[in-house]
Every structure is written in C-alpha cells, then in structure tokens.
Image (cartoon, rainbow, N blue to C red):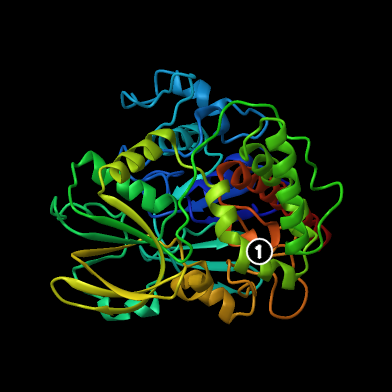
Amino acid sequence: MSKLHGQPPITVAIIGGGLSGAAVAYHLAGLTDADVVVIEPRANLGRGLAYATPDPDHRLNVPDHKMTLRSDQPEHFRRWLHTAEAPSLPANSARLSGEIYAPRAVFGTYVAAQLAPLQRAGRLRHVQARVISVGRTDRYTLGLSDGGKVVADIVVLATTHPNAGLPRELAGLAGDPALIGDPFADGALAGLAEDARVLIVGNGLTSADIVASLHRRGHRGQITALSRHGYRSMPHGPVQAATTADFAHTLASTALQLLRQVRVALAQDQALGLTWHAVFDRLRVQGPVIWAAFQEPERRRFLRHLRALWDIHRFRIAPQTYEANQQMQRLGRLVSLGARIVSATPGSPVKIGLQARHNGTRFALAVDRVVLATGPAHGGIIAAVPALADLAALGLLQPDPLGLGLLTAANGQAVPVSGAADGTLLVAGPLARAAVGELMGVPEVITWAEHIAREVARQVVARRGLVAAQ
C-alpha cells in the first residue's frame, strides 16, 4: 500500500508489546505502510509476562514444532532454534522423540529476533514506556509514563495479563511477607528456606512451574497444591492417530450436550486404543465454532461446571515439568488437595482454615509461605490498567459479562457502551476470549493476532478513503 500524496500518515498504536502485541505488529508491518507504534515498557518486544521469566524450569508447555509466530509456517520456531542467533538450551530440553521443550525465555528471544529487522527498517517503532492516560477527540491521545505522548488513529489493546487476584479469604495476608503474590517476579522464591512449608493456591500450570523450580533448588519442605476440585494439569500423550470425532458437524447448543458428546467420543476412542488426548486436540481445533454456538447462559454454565476439567486436559505441562512434579509427589513433598479456603490467620506459621470438597470436613493447615497461582484476574483488568480505565470512562469499552476480559465483537472491535464501534479500537490477545473462546495458547493467540492485523489494515484503507473524500 502506498500513502496518498499530501495525506498525513495513519498511526496505529499497539498498547502492550508482549506476545499478542508483538504478533500484531509483526503481521501488520507486512500488510500496511502505516506508522506502527508499539508501546511497551520492557526493553525487548515479544517477551511480556509469560516469556520474560529467566527461570530455566519455566518451560514451554508444547514442543518446538507447535510454537510459531506464523501460522502458515508451523516449524518457524523449530528452524530458528537451529540458527546461530538462538541461545543454547539446557541439557534436558530435548526428548528422545526429538521434540524440544525450551525455556519460555527462549521463545521470547525468538519473537524479539523476528521483530528486530522490522524495527531497524523503520517498519515499526518501539516506544519504551507505559500508557498512563487516554483521551479521544477525532484521534486518540496516549499519555506516556516518560512524559511524552503518542497520537494515533487506531489503537490495538494488547495489555499484559493482570496479576492473580487475592481471594477474599486471604485478605488478612495482604502485605504480609509470608504471601508471595507474584511467583514469577525476580527473586520471588529466593528467600524460601529449604524446609519451608509452602501452600500453593492453584493447581494448574503456574503451580507446576513453581514445584519444578523448588525441585531443582532441592526443596525438602512440604508443598501443598490447593484447588477447589483437586485437579492437576495433565501430561502430553503418545504419538497416535487423530480421532474421528467431529464436534462441529452436530454443534452442541448446551454445555451438557457437549459433555455427552465428549464422553461418547472418549469411549469410542478408547475402544480403538486412543488416549483422551486425541479428543481434546480436536476440541481445541474446533473450539471457536463450538463456543460461537453457545448463548451466554450456556457459556456461563460451561465456565462454572466444565472449565476446570477443560483446563487440566487442554493446558498440558512439559514432560520435564511433569517428571519433577511426579518425583516431588513420590518423595512425599508434594500433596494435592481439593478444598476451599475458609480462613487465613497471619503469624508464624500462617494458619489456613480449609473445607474439603469431597465431604465438607473442616481442617487447618500450618504453613510458612502462601504462593498465589490462581491465574490472571482478568475480571478486574479495567480497574488495574489506567489506559483501559480511561477508555471505559469515555464509554469506548466495557467488561464482558463473563468476567474474562473485554466485551469484543466477533471481528475484534471493542464494543462501546452505546452506539456502533467505529473500527478504531481493537482487542488482541486473551482479553478477547469471551468472544472467541480459547485465547490462551500460542496457536490461538497467533491466529487471532493475524486476524487483528488484517482488520487493522482494512481500517487503515478505510480511513485513508475518508480523508481523501474530505
């Protein structure tokens, strides 16, 4: 595309330069010559919260051949790992099958490496700051933490995941040194004694990463991983044939109907010698179509009753992480509990009151540290991010009713409080998942980023047409 003679450039501002924002910028740079500005406080684009962790035990949870910045080149990352610019990997990264489960920081380096040539060529700019205010007239004015500002015609929201919210039952521990609110912060586990009794609130991927880190450090104290259901993240399965199940052919209209379909498919696959992994792989591929067929009440039912089961089968952990967790369990140092917290009393030790899920029995647990691993508090994202708070105050966006992020149209545009969206405010990454369905895994994030880039490119053309007509 070429700029029209005499027209001012169209500026696209991407707020957030983690994977979602970086992916949108990468693909947008190939679709338009608009001025693309990524506003991200970190020194490098593409790392964000997930891929900035320096801990080598915080691994990608899928193998190298399923990680890519380009959906049209599934092995893009795998090929890059064998280039001279790729960093060396820990000795146990590769499996006998040849699959590589690299540290997450390595994938962050890969994404940054793909954007660097575009930055050098002037195809996109990185402004290393935070957006602290947003105003809107005919264009957006973004106030920055360094005192500067960016004026943009189109804004893409790709803000980072918020920290885990503190459960109200743990409110008494707010500010207490025994509480580790962000386990991925630099040095978060550094002061933990080898024999410390640790309660991890949450039993998903973050919990598994924490246990793997403590395992490498030789932790000998009791670790209790707590969740409402007591489920733990599952490992990857064997190489096997694909399932013949097709959930998109006869779409379920209710969560219960979908559950019945899944159970039938699992039984049929088991009779053929397949593991459950094949069915859930198919569910993941067909997820957007399945989700789109649900009305809001059924989406709520799915989240309330089936989300925990979906998460542990969908979000599988790297073999190395799984083995570390299994070893800690065999040594008696890791216990998983299905219970809810009913009270928390500060002190040394901290006393946690619990109620067991299976029989309602109440009991107490004495621990030295409490680690939050409940996942990002997306429901409170607007209040947590100044840019979103300002946009909400202007009526340009609103939370989605499911508490997953922002209310987003199917094409990625933020839904204003009143009136129709004008195409100048779009949502990238997990904050759009109430509209899309699954938007936490890298393949889904990249596919959505490619869609957002195409939508932005169309809006650039449309705005140029409007300016030319004036």
Residue 174 lies, with reference to residue 192, above or below; the image says below
Amino acid at the residue labelled 1: Ala
| Most distant residue in the right direction | 250
Residue drawn at x 18%, y 69% as measured from the top left: 177
Q: Point out residue 22 in the picture as x, y percentages from the top left corner.
A: 52, 45
Between 404 and 203, which is closer to the camera in this rendering? 203
Q: For this view, does 99 lie left or right of residue 399?
A: left
Q: In the picture shown, does residue 121 fall above or below 94?
A: below
Crowd tier of the residue under label 1, counting other residues whose Cα lies within 10 Å: few below 14, some 14–19, many 20 or above: many
Please report the residue visible at 63 percent of the width from the left and 71 percent of the height from the top. Answer: 402
Q: Can residue 141 be seen in this view?
A: yes
Whether residue 140 sits left or right of residue 56 in the image: it is right
Is 133 in front, or is 196?
A: 196
Rendered location of residue 216, percent (x, y): 24, 39
- Element under label 1? helix
Which residue bears the numbered disc 1? 434
Instruction: Please tell me which residue is depicted at 48% across the width and 50% down the height of the picture.
Output: 17
The front one of 245 and 394 is: 245
Q: Residue 269 appears in which quarter of the rendering?
A: top right
- Locate the C terminus and report the quarter of the image it occupies: bottom right
In this view, the residue in front, 439 or 395, is 439
Residue 199 x, y percent position in the rendering: 28, 62
Residue 109's x, y, as percent? Answer: 41, 35
The answer to whether any part of residue 411 appears in the image is no
Image quadrant containing the N terminus: top right
Task: Tally the numbered discs.
Answer: 1
